[in-house]
């Protein structure tokens, strides 16, 4: 119970990596605020999973590209669990579609930047005023930020690269307040993201090229997040941590 009585917000927390993180934080004792933007059924499933194991959680709808929704999410957390928020996990984001330069509209570029980068800014701005010393933020970047991504992923990779830079900036800015900020760069993890956006044969080839010869699991990512927000990692900040089975090295 490393996180007993801590309050955690997980954006994009209703499914895949966000669900695994939400459930693991609850197992560790945190009171979890699970954000979702659509698929309320998935959010309800996540809530029921947490509650079935004796955890505490609420679900809150919101679009994290909108300041009003980000502020509302924090307010709902405070109403449910008290004024302080100790953990912020920015999972919300996505590739949405693969578009090469000649196919990409300005509106699509702007949307990807808002979804993957602006959301981190808005949630950090909304949450930090309520974070005491000892709190922690974990942002989700991607292996694409390291290598530029696959075909048609330039906007996504660029936004995720910016998340890495923003993580370092926030770590410097918030460190004097006792708030740590780190990010993760997952490689190929077995989630619906790759079911939707990755060619099955290319996906198999990547897994076979990984030293561990497999994809990662959401639980492995969740375990790392739980460590990063616990008191076992209190001298870690400003890091962009790769979790890709040795597929690529920073």
Image (tube, grey):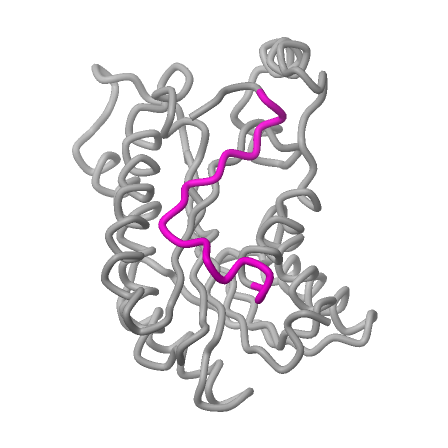
- Residue at image point 57% right, 53% down: 225
Q: Quadrant of the C terminus?
A: top left
Span shown in magenta: 230-246
- Residue at image point 46% right, 86% down: 78
- Residue at image point 64% right, 72% down: 3
Q: Position of residue 25 (x, y in %)?
A: 65, 64
- Residue at image point 24% right, 52% down: 169
Q: Position of residue 221 (x, y in %)?
A: 62, 44
| In the image, residue 113 above or below residue 101 | below
Q: Position of residue 41 (x, y in %)?
A: 65, 60
Decide whether residue 241 is among the magenta residues: yes
The image quadrant of residue 192 is top right
Decide whether residue 180 is among the magenta residues: no
Foreground residue among 127 and 19: 127
Q: Position of residue 72 (x, y in %)?
A: 37, 78
Foreground residue among 126 and 179: 179
| In the image, residue 194 above or below residue 33 | above
| In the image, residue 223 above or below residue 241 | below
| In the image, residue 19 above or below residue 100 | below
Q: Quadrant of the N terminus?
A: bottom right
């Amino acid at each position: 119970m490393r996180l007993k009585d801590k309050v955690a917000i997980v954006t994009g927390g209703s499914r895949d990596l966000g669900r695994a993180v939400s459930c693991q934080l609850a197992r560790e004792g945190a009171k979890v605020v699970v954000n979702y933007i659509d698929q309320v059924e998935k959010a309800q499933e996540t809530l029921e999973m947490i509650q079935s194991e004796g955890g505490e959680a609420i679900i809150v709808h919101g679009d994290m590209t909108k300041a009003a929704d980000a502020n509302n999410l924090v307010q709902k957390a405070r109403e449910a669990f008290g004024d302080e928020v100790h953990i912020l996990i920015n999972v919300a984001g996505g590739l949405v579609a693969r578009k090469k330069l000649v196919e990409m509209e300005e509106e699509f570029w702007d949307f990807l930047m808002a979804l993957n980068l602006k959301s981190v800014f808005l949630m950090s701005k909304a949450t930090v005023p309520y974070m005491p010393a000892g709190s922690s933020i974990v942002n989700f970047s991607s292996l694409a930020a390291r290598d530029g991504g696959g075909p048609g992923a330039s906007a996504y990779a660029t936004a995720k690269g910016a998340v890495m830079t923003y993580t370092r900036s926030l770590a410097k800015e918030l460190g004097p307040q006792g708030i740590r900020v780190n990010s993760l760069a997952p490689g190929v993890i077995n989630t619906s993201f790759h079911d939707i956006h990755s060619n099955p044969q290319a996906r198999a080839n990547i897994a076979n090229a990984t030293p561990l010869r497999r994809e990662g699991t959401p639980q492995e990512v969740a375990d790392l997040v739980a460590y990063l927000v616990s008191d076992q990692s209190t001298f870690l900040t400003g890091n962009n941590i790769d979790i890709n089975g040795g597929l690529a090295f920073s």
